[in-house]
Image (cartoon, helix red, strand yellow):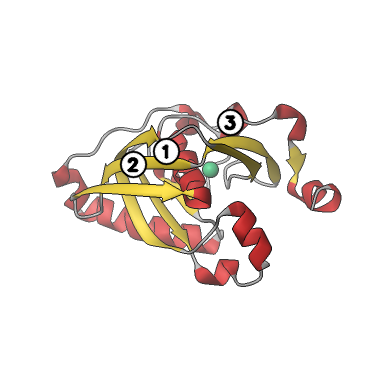
């Protein structure tokens, strides 16, 4: 997984048309991204993170990732399982004024974390892996994942949005904050 400092993480990804999406190359890329995300493990992975500057990301928050997290924490984060899915050429709209701040990390800024304010509710219009139009209404942690991944497709990292004084190694966050 590409780490921060690589210019590919700072470029706007290229938009895909339906012929691109259904091509064997893109279908194979989606499979590779699914495996890479699961191996990491992560709850989202954007194509620029594996060096491909295109508007495509995969998302999955598996029930097994949540199994060891206490119910009160899940409620606080408003986190629930999200099945595997693909977003292509996404357009994100913030819904309402509510925002929430939590520690967030990124597979491309390995070992670190910081507090990032994100909208609580978002709507995403995009295409799926078959090139079909899809509208997603998301809330809580899922809305945060979508904002984080769509930022990647536009060359933005969470470190551009973080509260800089909270920037911490993941180890120290658990040591001093958890
Ligand atoms: Zn990331």
Measure the alpha-carbon separation of dots 2 and 3: 28 Å
Q: Nearer the viewer, mark 2 or mark 3?
A: 2
Q: Is mark 2 within 8 Å of ligand 1?
A: no
- Mark found first going from the N terminus, 1 or 2: 2
Horizontally, residue 38 falls left or right of residue 124, namely right
Q: Is residue 118 above or below residue 145?
A: above
Residue carrying label 2:
124
Q: Is residue 140 above or below residue 34?
A: above
* Label 1 neighbour load within 10 Å: few <14, some 14-19, many 20+: many
Residue carrying label 1:
150
Task: Please say if the residues under marks 1 and 2 sit with CB atoms less than 8 Å apart.
Answer: yes
Measure the alpha-carbon separation of dots 3 and 1: 19 Å
The extreme left residue here reads 19
Horizontally, residue 116 falls left or right of residue 6, namely right
Q: Secondary structure at mark 1?
A: helix
Residue carrying label 3:
5
Horizontal and vertical percent position of residue 102: 65, 43
Q: Is mark 3 within 8 Å of ligand 1?
A: no
Q: Residue at x 38, y 28 (%)?
A: 12
Q: Secondary structure at mark 2?
A: strand
* Label 3 neighbour load within 10 Å: few <14, some 14-19, many 20+: few
Q: Residue at x 50, y 30 (%)?
A: 156
- Mark found first going from the N terminus, 2 or 3: 3
């Amino acid at each position: 997984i590409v780490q921060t400092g690589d210019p590919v993480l700072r470029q706007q990804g290229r938009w895909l048309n339906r012929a691109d999406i259904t091509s064997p190359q893109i279908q194979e890329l989606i499979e590779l991204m699914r495996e890479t995300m699961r191996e990491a493990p992560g709850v989202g992975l954007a194509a620029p993170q594996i060096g491909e500057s295109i508007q495509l990301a995969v998302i999955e928050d598996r029930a097994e990732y949540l199994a060891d997290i206490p119910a009160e924490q899940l409620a606080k984060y408003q986190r629930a399982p999200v099945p595997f899915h693909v977003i292509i050429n996404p357009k994100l709209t913030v819904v309402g004024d509510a925002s929430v701040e939590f520690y967030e990390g990124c597979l491309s800024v390995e070992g670190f974390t910081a507090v990032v304010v994100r909208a609580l509710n978002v709507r995403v219009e995009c295409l799926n892996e078959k090139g079909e139009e899809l509208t997603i209404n998301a809330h809580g942690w899922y809305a945060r994942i979508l904002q984080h991944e769509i930022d990647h497709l536009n060359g933005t990292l969470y470190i551009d949005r973080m509260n800089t004084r909270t920037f911490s190694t993941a180890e120290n966050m658990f040591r001093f904050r958890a």
